[in-house]
Amino acid sequence: MDSAAAANVPTSPWGKLKQPTEPVCLADIMSEEMAKDLHNKEEERCVKHLLAESEPLPIIDCPLGCDSDHMIAQMLQVQFDKEYDSMLKRTEDKFNGSSKVCISYSNYRVIPENLIYDSSSEDDDDDKGQEWDSFVCTEKAFRAMPKCGYKKEGDEMVTKHDMAMSGRRNACRVMEFPPEFQTGDGGGFDMQLSNKVFNSLKVHSRSEQSRRHRLHDKTEQATAEMCVDARTRLLLYRLVNQEVLDRINGIISTGKEAVVLHADGGTGQDCVIPKECAIKIFKTTLSEFKTRDKYIQDDYRFKDRFSKQNPRKIIHMWAEKEMHNLMRMRKYGILCPEVVLLKKHVLLMSFIGESHKPAEKLKEAFLKPADLAEAYVQTIAGMKKLYKYAQLVHADLSEYNILWHNKKCWFIDVSQSVDCNHPKALEFLYRDCVNVSRFFKKKGAEETMSAEELFTDITGLSVSEDGVEVLEQVQNFERSEVLLAHEQTEKHYPFEYCWDQSRNE
């Protein structure tokens, strides 16, 4: 091939051409007639494709070169007719229902049923291909039962009282029980329940629902062990909204009388708020701590306000009592949490610990012999200072209510602490001495005093170590103080004590 012929053969950078293409003039490409011709060919191809799929459609009566808007309008009309006929079919089925005499709306259809676009056949195909669970199938079968209550399937007569159908129906109705009634998931298999079982479940469901309604008010107003009631949540939300607290993190500990939460301090304007705070929420139910009365009804600070008829008021007084005790202890230099504020039964205090980790209780702390001896000395010094200067008795002092933080002992949980003028103050103090002495002796602390020696060291009252009679001697001291307070010269002893004394003599 010469150079002239090779120059006329077109080339392509994407590969070799099998056949040479005919050269096209640029004027022909830009011609409007050629563009219109290509458009007509494409439109003709689309119309032929539409006619091939829908031959009975009596709407194509225009030349092939019609405008494209006309074809779009025809396609929209076809869609509209299809939806109209589908709606007409649903209306007919709803009107007829299970009646033996039926009417037909076929004369109102735009497209006859035996032609295309019949939605009923398509819907049936979709239903056949779709997998339903047993409950849906049971509902469909039950709805298909005529009003007369029976139907004929083949050579057998099936009634609405059929055992299998009734069992499936009962299983279906069990799913309609309240959400709190756990029924499980029986849709994956053919579950059947007899009438006896279903009636028993129904009665049990109603009784449980009635019980929940009866306990609704009580559970809403009572603080549970691991949560708070609606009123307490509202108080906590207000503390956060008022920027007293930045965030409430979670529960630190729970007890018979309160729940303690950890929180991050906010930017309060009225008071100085620590970076980490402890929220003590006193439980608003007396079910777990029913012996509060003896700690508060004889306390001169709350004696006039005490009333057993108002339990919630007692809880508020209990929280107020702890606040006053903590403030008095801080005044005399006793290590204890610092009170930030009090809102009803919610007491906000400083947090004893670091980085969201509370300080260990003396019961749980691992102490070396030197630290154990130091903890004993600090505990005894705190008890003396609490009795002599703050004029208080802890009344529940033990290794569970003493925190070990930065090698120092911190006293907590002083809501039951009483004034020294309390009629049973010495009895409570002796109980504290027994708890402290028993713990440090068990741990192996050196030079640990006995409970009687510790009681004498704190109060200056001498008691003999005669076992059971020690408590009677303490009660005798209390009776003597009561008699002196009321200027009575005659001392009355209980019958049991006098009887034991006479037998010993």
Image: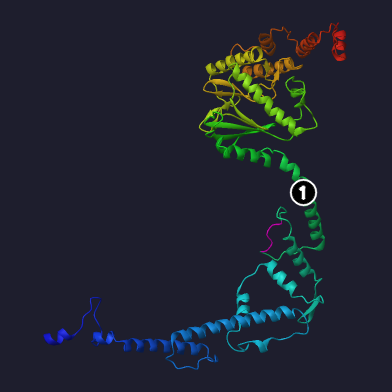
Q: Amino acid at mark 1?
A: His
User: Residue 447 location in percent, x, y?
Assistant: 60, 11
Residue at 62% x, 78% y is 123
Does 61 appear in magenta? no
User: Residue 26 location in percent, x, y?
Assistant: 24, 84
Identify the magenta region.
183-187
Asked if residue 333 shows in the view, the reply is yes
Say above or below: 169 vs 356: below
Q: For the N terminus, which image quadrant?
A: bottom left
Residue at 78% x, 77% y is 146
Find disc 1 in the rendering and name its residue: 213
Q: For the C terminus, which image quadrant?
A: top right
In the figure, is residue 273 to the left or right of 310? left
Circle 1 packing at 10 Å, graded few (<14), some (14-19), many (20+), is few
Near-viewer residue (289 or 326)? 326
In the figure, is residue 142 to the left or right of 446? right
Q: SS for tag 1?
A: helix
